Amino acid sequence: NNNHNENGKNIKSAAGDAGEAGAETASAAAVDPPPTARQLMIHAIRTSIPMIGFGFMDNTLMIHAGHYVDCTLGVTFGLSTLAAAGIGQIFSGVGGVVFGDALEVAFHRLAGAGRTATAMTKAQKAMRASRMAGLFGGVVGVGLGCTLGLVNLLFVDENKASLLKLQALEEGQEFEFEVEVDNLANPGYTTVRVRGPDVDGVLASITASIASCGCSVVELNAGSRRRDEEVMMDSLSDGAGSGAGAGAAAGAGAAGSDANDDSSAPGTTASNAASSILNSWQSQTPMRVEDTFVIRDRATQQAIDNDDLDALARAILTAAKDPLNTHSLKGQLEELEIENMALADRVLALEKMLEDRQVRVVPSSSASSFSKSERDKKE
């Protein structure tokens, strides 16, 4: 009987607890109605404010760090602009982790004005409408912050990295260029041959240098090859031939013991070895350019004078060593065009002033004009 009484008490207490929990849930549902439109709007704005700061900081760090990497590691190791941007994003992510909490606290304090009047309870924030409003505010805030972060592009020289990459020659490359100027190969024309390492911007720089020397390019043949490639091919061919001869001799010596031996196998092995050596050598040897220009004097339409060949060759060599020169010439040309437009405006203004001084008009007085009109009417 005692056990039955205790079980009954437990059941009653459990039922009582369940009833109290249900009452509390019902009271919570009654106390926490769905958030109003004003509350949802304010919740979205408060959620977007920290995201604006995060987006702005993210783009700022990525742009400046990526630009710095592009101008340093990108020039040294030949990294692309996208690779530099990816490395910059690493710095941006690290900065977001380090400063994220401080920024969130600061922006929440900034957005805390008037919070008590429109604050939502935890139950209201857990509702689907509140979650969607917070998501919308965060998306809009990040987009706006990243857009504002693009302002940093105004303070970054976007062409600096590309110019540094053009200007950066490997150690010793500037001494590998060779310039040959010939007046005998093509009668009436001057033939210029430039040999050297394959560096971006060299061809444009040489062409600009030729034009600045008062010459016009009639024909241009641009090609690439590897250093001493023909000599290497000849030496490998000789080695393959000697290997084939040795293989044939070994096969003839072994013919007495086994007539079915293949005497050409050693020669084939030597040829394969030579091909593998050539492939490995080509993969290690850098490409070189061999450009041929056929030019003539722009004024005389003839070959360059023999006395000017040395100066022309040295100017072309200087241009080949400095691929950045073509960009400098372009910048100078743009400056000259601006100055030319300013001078044209001044000339027009001076011409108008001179024309105004050349013309003199003396009008009659108003009284005399009136008298004359009166006389005309009377007549």
Image: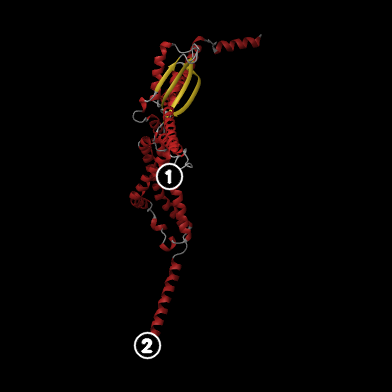
**Residue at 40%, 43% in the rendered image:** 86
Can residue 339 be seen in this snapshot? no
Task: Name the residue tied to disc 2.
Answer: 3
Against 289, residue 267 (above or below) is below
Depth-wise, is mark 1 or mark 2 nearer the camera?
2
Against 176, residue 1 (above or below) is below
Q: Amino acid under label 1? A: Cys
Front in this rendered view, residue 204 or 175: 175
Task: Name the residue tied to disc 1.
Answer: 146
Percent x, y of residue 128: 48, 60
**Residue at 43%, 60% in the rendered image:** 125
Where, by quadrant of the figure, is residue 197 drawn? top left
Where, by quadrant of the figure, is residue 9 drawn? bottom left
As drawn, the label of residue 240 is none
- Which part of the image, by quadrant, shows the C terminus? top right
- Which part of the image, by quadrant, shows the N terminus? bottom left
Percent x, y of residue 264: 47, 38
Against 378, residue 14 (above or below) is below
Specify the farthest residue to the front.
256
Q: Is residue 312 left or right of residue 375?
A: left
